[in-house]
Image (spheres, rainbow, N blue to C red):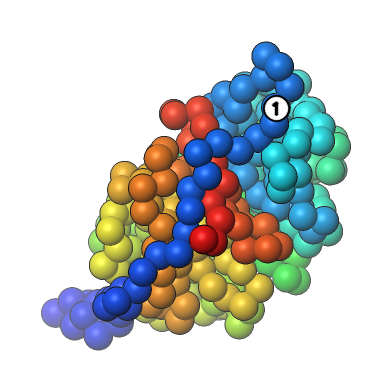
Amino acid sequence: MKSILFAVLAMVAVVPLADAQSKWEVLPSWGDLPAGTTWGPASQASTTPDGQIVIFRREVPHFFVVSPEGKLVKSFGDSKYRLAHGIRVDREGFIWITDNTDNIVQKLSPDGKVLMTLGKAGSTGDNNSQELFDGPADVFVAANGDIFVADGYRNSRVVQFSKDGKFIKKIGGVKGTEPGQFNVPHSVVVDSTGRIIIADAENSRIQVFDASGKFLEQWTGFPAKPRGSLYLAADDTLYVSHVDSESISIMKNGKIIDSVTAVGLRPHGLTVDRQGNLYVTGPLTQMVKKIVKK
């Protein structure tokens, strides 16, 4: 009974602004790729400190670096990932990726040299493992260098490591619907106050924890499951992509303040450039689209 009451009191419903009118335009095409080159199964995207867009693809070359105008700057990455899934570029320009099938998280140099690997390729660890994963979906590097891994396709947790890859703690670890439990934690970010924000995809909610891992609240009422990506801007504006409804929710302080609809593909990946334009990727639709303010 106490757990039910706790869940009710802790729940914060996501309520869109009543008269919010989206001012976004989904460009019909973006990307001046070389002849014979296509986006292919583009899983995820991230923005570099100098404003380039890095696309993580499920075929070689795995990485496209593209200017905001759509010019392919370079491509690299011929070592085959079994299932390229998540990508983040940290504040120093290092690339972090997750391979959902091989159960690894890697830190790469800007040109693709492997600098660190968490997990072991082809090995699986349960929710109590401090070294292995089972279905890592996303990785996020906090301002202090700590690494957060959403280990969520087969496990049900987020794992925190030091910048050197040393295990610190896990959040969750039990599959379920109660506060602090997860059913496919698909994406994770850490805001400016140190709160850990996790897209609990199959539970159709976002869960929020303090820096110690204590549950604070949950946000619900989305147009579809947050089974896509979280992008956190410098001012803590949160962008949430929804694969099933082909839409993006834009949030501030736990409330939806705007939304982008009719994206035109299943937006699995999401990033934002320095001008506030959005870029979404769809590995199944094999498209990348740019979304700008009208």
Quadrant housing residue 264:
top left
Say which residue appears at 31% left-offset and 48% top-offset: 245
Q: Is residue 222 left or right of residue 193?
A: left
Q: Is residue 218 left or right of residue 198?
A: left
Say which residue appears at 41% left-offset and 69% top-offset: 258
Q: Is residue 205 left or right of residue 263?
A: left
Residue neighbourhood size for the residue with mark 1, other residues' Cα within 10 Å, grouped as few (<14), some (14–19), many (≥20): some
Say which residue appears at 29% left-offset and 54% top-offset: 224
List the single residue furthest toward the front: 294
Residue 49: image location, x then y, percent: 79, 58
Tell me: residue 280, above or below residue 21: above
Residue 276: image location, x then y, percent: 62, 63
List the single residue furthest toward the left: 1
Tell me: residue 259, above or below residue 4: above
Q: Is disc 1 placed on a helix, strand or loop? A: loop
Quadrant housing residue 99:
top right
Q: Amino acid at mark 1?
A: Leu
List the single residue furthest toward the top: 36
Label 1 belongs to which residue? 33
**Residue closest to the eye, 279 or 102:** 279
Residue 6: image location, x then y, percent: 25, 82
Quadrant containing the N terminus in the rendered view: bottom left
Residue 15 seen: yes
Residue 157 seen: no
Tell me: residue 159, above or below residue 210: above
Quadrant housing residue 69:
top right
